[in-house]
Every structure is written in structure tokens, then in C-alpha cells.
Amino acid sequence: MSPVLGKPVNRVDGPDKVTGTGRYTGDIVLPGLAHAMIVRSAVANGRVLSIDTSLAEAAGGVLGIMTHENTPKVAAQPKLVPSLAGQPAPGESFFPMQDDQVHYWGQPVAVVVAETLEDAAYAAALLDVTYEPGVPVATIEDGRNAAYEAKMIFGGLMPARDERGDVDSALADAEVKLDLTYHYAANHHNPIEPAVTTAQWDGDRLTLYDSTMGVRATQLTVAQLLGMPLSDVRVITHFVGGAFGSKAMVWPHVTLAAMAARFVGRPVRLALTRAQSFTSMGLREEQEQRMRVAARRDGQVTGIKHEKLSVTSPFDDWAEPATGSSSQVYGPENYLGTHHLIRGNTMTPTFTRAPGESFGSFTLECTMDALAYELGMDPVELRIMNHPPVDPHGNAWSSDGLADCLRSGADRFGWAERDMTPGTRRDGNWLIGTGVAAAGYPVAFFMPVQHARARIFHDGSVIIQTSTQEFGTGVATAMSQVAADGLGVDMDVVRFELGDTDLPNTTSAVGSMGATMVSSAVHNAATTLRNDLIALAVNDDASPLHGLSPSSVRVGDGRMTSTLDPSISESYADALQRNRLLDMEALGSWTPPPFDTPHGLLTFGAQFAEVAVDKDLGLVRVRRMLGVFAPGRVLNPKLARSQLMGGMLWGMQQAIHEGNRIDRQSGRWALNSLGEYLVAVHADVPEIEADFVEVEDDVVGPLGVKGVGEVGQVGAAAAVANAVFHATGHRFTELPLTPELVMSGLPG
Amino acid sequence: MRPVSFFRASSIDDAVAAVSGHPDSAFLAGGTTEIDLLRLGVVQPSLLVDVNDLPLTYLEDTDDGGVRIGAMARMTDVARAPRIVERYPGMSQALLLGASEQLRNMASMGGNMCQRTRCSYFRDPTSACNKREPGSGCAALTGVNRGHAILGTSEQCIATHPSDVAVALVALDAVVRTIGPDGTRSVPVEDFFLRPEDTPNVEHPLAHGELIVAIDVPDLPLARTSRYVKHRDRASYEFALVSVFSAMRVDDAGNVAELRLALGGVGTVPWRAHRAEQSLIGRPATPENFAAAADAELADARTTPMNEFKVAFAKRAIVRELSEVTS
């Protein structure tokens, strides 16, 4: 193996990003560019009675105003399917401005196109829209009585019910029983870059510059909505300023940008405002989760019943799949997981970092903590004793590592010195506690075949191409390492090109699958090209390597060398030049294992947290976090740690800060700026560490890479909440852990 | 684009004349709130008169031993000025706990006095708001009002006053000095902030075109031990759930001899805790008396299910603060 794989090399695009030369979608200026502004519905339910455009049209710079009365009908509305599947992937099975109906607050009712962004914003404010409003169903409380059990969730990809054994009997017969109900406020993603799309038509051909996690998904979705051949839709993205799931699906504004560009006959940029981001790109839905656990006195969990209730849109049976962790991590013999839905006046919820496992594992891991206290068992040991070597189907894990993560984390965190009794540590006005949680995140193989192309020029420089996107993960860096390793060249001669549907297909980088699938395709492309180069040399009379068996040639530093005699060697460049080849290229493919591959497929980790709780005021501050993870081969530990720490901090803020609230009368999200919707600031960041335990995995691809994009978030909030229990002796079952909630459990 | 005229005034007289001569105009100081509100469509003046060039950035001692702060002095400069840090440390702390360093570098003291509420219904032109559009109603009364005020509210408005430094200034009996079309005025700072009552759109007793030129902070030896503590959901860059400005002297007998107490985050105006002060002066400085004083101050609190926690929160915060000052 080349020394570059697995090394903490710096980001290849770091200088571009920090010096401002990296061009994000909103930085792209085209000749004649016009600007579009969406006008959002100010009611959550009802219909548009009239739209008076006269004032707006009279304002300066206005080029056109689209409403439901003049917006073209879509050719075909695709159904919601997660973008990883490689099919059209609308965020909701609905397209606005096709009629006068309003289904959610903030639904686009008009698009104003003008010469400048300021002109568009002003004219949009002058539009006079009148409504016939209905009463919105906005929250779980509004619709609890109309809840129904979903059959399929996640865009029809997953059954909503997971059942084995007889959980009711297990609960009836249990030596120890727990029954806890949790309530979770909705989360919005809030990447620092709000979504933006620029559309340009050239005759019947469309180019979209889109801030997306999947250029292919945008291409597939827009082509179907507009009735165009895929070959006429090109989608480009160079840098994306974060996404966290909000750009995993293709939301209506993307296609509206294309429609607007055709409407005014000019290239159009449509940028969402921060406030619009709260009503335009989905969300993690408000939810209630109830968990009942049956266990023996010795700690063995015999049954889990996990029920989720949440609000979805009028169009889709969407629920974050909450029961994956509770079904698998401790794999009880008797299990029932269900998802109940309420149809409400919301847009369709969507992937939000660690979809499903985020709150699902919070429910599981807080309940396991409660069980540990009920039994008087150490929470780390209880988890290890209940974690089986196989998944619920009896298939061995493709790779495991959970027990090692828990034990090595416990060692490093100083868990052994912990007095399990709650409320025993104090630092001035602060109650101190520590908590643990396990993490498991699925490895999902429902993507299509992945492709990458490797090309070497006769000077020895290399281009690797695939359509994947850079949205902060460091993919260009990690894939340059993979390519350099596979081809046997220095990383600094490799350039990685991405973010364009004209390049070979890789699917949306979602579900923590980006590193796995892209590295597999890139590795296969690089090693195929390497093999072709070796074949060129050993079959070439003029090569010093002529006649050698390909297996006795090793590569490195851009050279092929005999393993038998290191003095027999030549460079790739020499071989190409001698053969009058200006370049040579190879396509690499990776076909994922079948969706039902007979292996347990989770990425595991363990989270530890120390918190301080103000003994009177209920304020929670996190002092220390440690996460230990088993993501298989780590391509670049610097990038991986960065992602994992980001995930852990996301989990911390989900525990103590994040949560949107809906205005029940209007159905409007009340918090719609970063001043009101709280995310952690630097001052909130504790001493934090992320580390790895090594596991080998030969199922998940040629390099054995599992993702780190989401598992860092899983369990982090639960570790914080369990630490709050340890500090206060009170188990809170709501998120976020606001001071008023925590105060309610303090003596004062 | 919505047309806005812009005029950079080079003298106070020009600034006052420009605004008072145009009915639909406003002063523009640091702009850290006003520009946001312009963009949101919450305020829509057709003329902005920039006062950033006016010679009002000074900080000087007054004849009676206090400090005069020019209206265009930036929050950062005031917070770090030695005479403020030494003589009014609670005021310096209040400034430094507000906003972020970048905003404090731009925001002016006069502008801070005119800072608008963060009520999300005020900031959303599609919502009913009597402060933004008199007579349209108050969506906050039955809406998401966790952050809203519990003291000084009315049926028309429960918006919280957001300023930190104004809490210090009401405790210090500061005076706002203005120049308007009718000449100069001095307004005690507590009278400068009007409770909403039936006209929540009227926040200050300022005539159109009347410009704040300075804030006078009187001499107060007690203020040399003043403190400001701010409690909020996250560690920084957030408005207060509850904040407490305090300065207290306990005599040798253990009785409260002098006390200045004011609260942020709970009132429709920066809240001077007169009742608590009166109930404690001359009485033993004990946690029981602190609690009784807090109860007295909060007795008239009007709450909603979402913000009723602020009563207990404020009480605990007051008792803790006074107890810590005592010990």
C-alpha cells in the first residue's frame, strides 16, 4: 500500500476555500444573469384567491412574475424516492404553483424575476396575495386522533413495521419492565450556505448550477418534471457550503429556477433566503417515541417495543425510520417497531443528519441507561452484554467493534472512577454528571452501479473524474489519496474532478455512503488503469519490463518496478511516450452488494459526555465529549475526525439547543433565523475528541470503508442526556433539554 | 429595488434638520439592527440620514464626577474604556455580553438605546403586530412566546426589550441627552423607555427628528462593585433569558445599605427592580429577604404557558446574584 492512504493529509481544496477563490454556486455569474425570488404562502392551509401583481410589475427591473396561473404544468410528477437509489428524487411528491391550493406555510405561490436580487426582493414584497385560509394541522397535538399506522416509509423503500417474536408476551412476563415516552422538537438543517440554483437554457438544453449533494438526482428529477431527455440536462456543482441532508433531495426551487429562466429567456439565479430555508428544504419532523423494554434481572433484554408518531405532509408517507437501532444493536428476541403518521400542513420532512437513528437511538440509549439504573448495572457493561455477534436475521456483522469502542472509550474517559449514584458531583453552582451511549448507523446498499474514470497523461499527471459532490466532507482530498494509492503515483500529480453530470456516475453522497461508494469506484478505476499500464510495459519489446509477469511488477512514485530486481524499472510517462500515447484512461465500476446481502450492516461507535447542570437555573453546559468509532478503513483520519467531531457537536446541540416550534394558529415555523433557531456557537464547544478502533470489513467495498458522515451524531445527544440524569437524578424525555425543562426537575 | 434616499450628515444640525424636515425618514447609526429590519421590510423609511460622521464618539468625565458617553461611541470602545471598567464594571460587562465582537465594533450607544425587539412576530411582516402595524393585533400573545416579557406587558404587546447595556443604565439612573428641532432635552433613562400599554409602536418620548447625542451616567461609588450576569440557552451570542445588574452595599450590621437592581430579558423595557430595592434597603442581607424581594418584584408578572418559567428563573437568578455579592 502506498503510504498516502490513511494519512492525515490536508485538504487539497483548503486554500481555495479559505482564500475565497473556491467558487460556490452563488458565486457563478453568467452573462445576462437575472435573479428570482420566491414568494411564499402566508397561510398553511387553504387556497389562493387572488394575486395582484400590478404594484410589483410597476416596480423597477421586473422581468416576469410566475404564479399558478401562468406557470407551465410539469410533465410528470415523480414520486419521492431517496436520492441514493439513483432515481428521480423530489423532496416531496408535489410541485407548487400548479393550482391554487396551499398545503403548507411557505409553499411557493409566485416567483418574481428581476434584473437584480434587490429588485426581485422588493417586487416580491409588493405582491398582494389573498387567501381563503383553512385551519392548519400543524403539530402532533393537532392531529393525534387522526394518526394511522404507515405501511411503507422512506419513500416506499422500507416497511414501516419490523416485528419478530412476541413482544407483548415478553413484556407481560418480564422480570423488569420500562415504559418511557419521548417528545422531540423538529430540527432544521441550517447549512451555512442556503440553497441556490442558477439555470441557463441553450435552445432545448439546460445547464443547472445547483447547490446539491447529488448532481445526478437533480438531473434525473428536473428532466422528468420538465419532460426532457437526460442528455439535455447538465448539472454542475463545484463547492457546496454544507447540506446535512437538506440538499439530498431535489426541492421545487431547483425546477422553478429552470422554469423562470425559460420564462424570461435569460439565465436566472434563484437563491433561497435564510428564512426561506426553513420552509423550502424539508426538516426533521416533530416526533413522539414510546419505548417499552422487557428484561431479566441479570440484564438480558428480552423484548423491545418501539413506537414512533410523527407529522408528515399531505403528499408522502415520510417518517425518519426510527427503529433500526432498537431492532439491531441489542437484537432482542422479541421486537416490534412501528411508525404512525399524521397528515399535516407541512412540507414533506426529509433526511437530516443521521436520519432516523438520531432520535431513534436517543430513545433506545436513554432507555438502556434507565434500565442500567433500574438494575444497578454499569451502563457500559449492560450494553456490551446485550450486543449480539449477529444481526436479527442471524447474519454476522460485516464488521463490528462496538464492544471495543465502549471499552476503549470507557478507559480513556475515566469511566471506572465514576460513582454511578446520580447527583453526587458538584462544582460550585454546577451539578456534574457523565453519560454514555452506543451508536449504530446503517450501511445501505440501494445505490446503482458506481463509475469513475482515471486518466494519465504522458507527462505522468493524472485526472480522476466522477460526478460526486464536495459539500464539506473532504471527498476531493480522500479520493486523491485513493487514486494515488491505486495507481501508484504521488498525490500531488493527481487532480480530482467532480460535481458534473457529464462525468461518470456516482450517486448522491447521502446516507453516509459517499466515501464507501466513491472510493470503491475510484479505486477500481485507478487499479484498472495501473493494470493496463503494466500490461503495456510487459508486452512492449522496448520496455525494460518486457516479458515480466504483471504480478511481478509493483508500482509507486509513478514508476513500474520489477519485484524481482528493483533496478528494472520505468516510469509511466516513459512507457506512454515511447508508445506515442498522449494519454491512457480506464473506467472503474463498482457494483454494490445486493440490498439484502447476508451480513449485519451497521457502523458502530460509543459516545461519552460530561455535563454541568446549573443547580437552580437548569442550564446545561457540556464540558467534555469523547467518541470512539469503528468505521472500517479510514482513508484520511484528519478528515474523518473532523466529520465525526462535527457530528458529535451536532448531537450536543440537538440535546441542549436545537428545536423549532410551530405557531399553532398560523402553522408557521416560529424560529426562522440563526438568531432564534439555536445552534451551538464556539463558546459552547467542549473539550472534544474522536478516535477509532480498527475493524476490517471485506463486504462494504474493495477498500473496506464505512462512512463517518452520520455515526458521529448518533448517540451523542443520548450521552449528554444520560449525563444530565447522572448530574441531577432526573430523567428528562424531551429534546431539547431547555432550562425550563431541566429546572422542572430541580429542587431550586 | 425599493428606493431609499441616503444622506450623510456632517453636523448635528444638518442631521436634525434632514430628519425633521422629512416625515418618512430615520437616523442611521451603526445599523446593526436597522439594516436587518429594512431588509425584512419591517421598517421602510424613504430617507436615511447617516449620523456616523458626527463628532459624537467621545467619552468624557462630567463636572459632577460622572461620565458622558457620546451617542456614536461604539459599544466595544465604551466596554473597554478604563473609566467605565473601573467605575461601572457592571456596565462594561453588560456591553461585552451583548451581541458579538463584530457587532459591538459597529453598534453605537445611541443606536443601542433605540434597539428594537427581537419578537419574531414583529420581525415577520406577515404576522399581526401592534408594534409594527398599530391595530393589527398581537400574534405573540397566543403564539410562540417563550422569550417574551412577563413584566410591563399589555394586551397589545408582550415584546421583550433586548438590550443589555440599557439594563445597566436604568440601574445607574443615566440620562439621555437629545437635540431636536425644538432644542436640547435631558430625559431620565427610565422615562426614555415607554411600556407598550395601548401604543406599543411608540417606544420612546422622542419627537421626529430628535437625535440622541449623549448618555450621562452619574457618579455612583456603589457602581464600582456592580456586576452584570446574563443567563441564556447557549454560552454566547444570544439574547438573555434573564439577566441581572446589581450593585449592593451591606453595612457592618449586615443590613442592605445601598442597592441598585435591574433585570433584562423579562420586561417590555429594561427593568429597574424598584420594588425589590425598596423591600431590601435597611433590612438584613439574607437569602430569605432576597427571595422575598424577588417575589415582590415579580408579583405582577403576567405569563403565558411558554414563558411562565421566567418567574422562577428570575427569582433564582436574583437570589443567587445578591447572595454572591454578599459573600
Image (cartoon, rainbow, N blue to C red):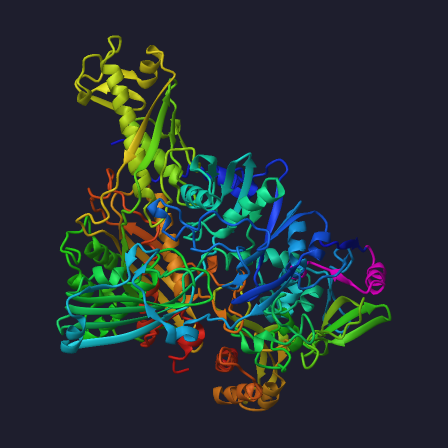
Residue B43 higher or lower than A636, as above or below: below
* Tally of marks: 0
Query: Which quadrant does the C terminus of chain A fall into?
Result: bottom left
The residue lying toward the viewer, choosing from A97 and A694, is A97
Query: Which quadrant does the N terminus of chain A fall into?
Result: top left
Using residue A401 as the reference point, say whether residue A730 is left or right of it: right
Q: Quarter of the image holding residue A521? A: top left
x and y percent of residue B81 in the render? 65, 61
Q: Quarter of the image holding residue A413? A: bottom left
Q: Which residues are magenta?
A: B10-34
x and y percent of residue A242 in the render? 45, 49
x and y percent of residue A66 in the render? 60, 51
Residue B306 higher or lower than A279, as above or below: below
Residue B297 visible in the picture: yes
Residue A7 visible in the picture: no
Magenta span has B126? Answer: no
Using residue A625 as the reference point, say whether residue A680 is left or right of it: right
Q: Quarter of the image holding residue B15? A: bottom right
Residue A472 higher or lower than A619, as above or below: above
Using residue A742 as the reference point, say whether residue A566 is left or right of it: left
x and y percent of residue A554 in the render? 23, 23
The residue lying toward the viewer, choosing from B324 and B160, is B160
Magenta span has B17? Answer: yes
Residue A578 higher or lower than A699, as above or below: above
The residue lying toward the viewer, choosing from A523 and A93, is A93
What residue do we see at 33% from left, 41% from top? A636
What residue do we see at 30% from left, 29% from top? A526
What residue do we see at 36% from left, 15% from top? A581
